[in-house]
Amino acid sequence: MPVPLLLGLLAICIFMLSGCSVTGACVGTGGVLLFTECKEDWDQSECDSWNDQGINGATWTFHKGQSCPDLGYTEMCSDGSYREPGNC
């Protein structure tokens, strides 16, 4: 493979891996939530917005690059959020 082609492919790979919008898990605790709730595949601005608005009176924290199951919230509830097993 010619060097310019390899450099082009490398540049494309770096661009794709850098991620224009990195998603993660947004975890809400406290307020009117009876159990800690986790939202999957959110970006930081979505999570920050919920925290700034005080949605459900909870504190919302973004976990970049992590999923709800990574954080121990493995049960998906009917509303699409995740909680610890047995808390839906």
Image: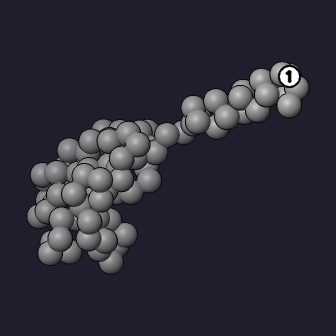
Which is more toward the observer, 19 or 52? 19
Residue 82 image position (x, y, % from top left): 28, 65
Asked which quadrant contains residue 1, the reply is: top right
Q: Secondary structure at mark 1?
A: helix
Q: On the rendered image, what quadrant is the C terminus found in? A: bottom left
Which residue sits at x=44%, y=53%?
41
Task: Kindly indicate the quadrant of the structure image that contains residue 85.
Answer: bottom left
Query: Is the residue marked by circle 1 packed among few (<14), some (14-19), or many (20+) residues within 10 Å?
Result: few
| Residue closest to the far bottom | 78
Which of 74 and 41 lies nearest the eye of the viewer?
74
Q: Can see residue 87? A: yes
Residue beneath disc 1: 4
- Indicate whether 80 appears above or below 64: below
Q: Is residue 2 left or right of residue 79?
A: right
Where is residue 19 drawn, in percent x and y?
57, 36
Residue at horizontal 29 percent and vertical 74 percent from the top: 77
Q: Is residue 9 left or right of residue 38?
A: right
Residue 21 at x, y = what percent? 54, 39
| Picture coordinates of residue 49, whole percent (x, y) | 37, 42
Q: Amino acid at mark 1?
A: Pro
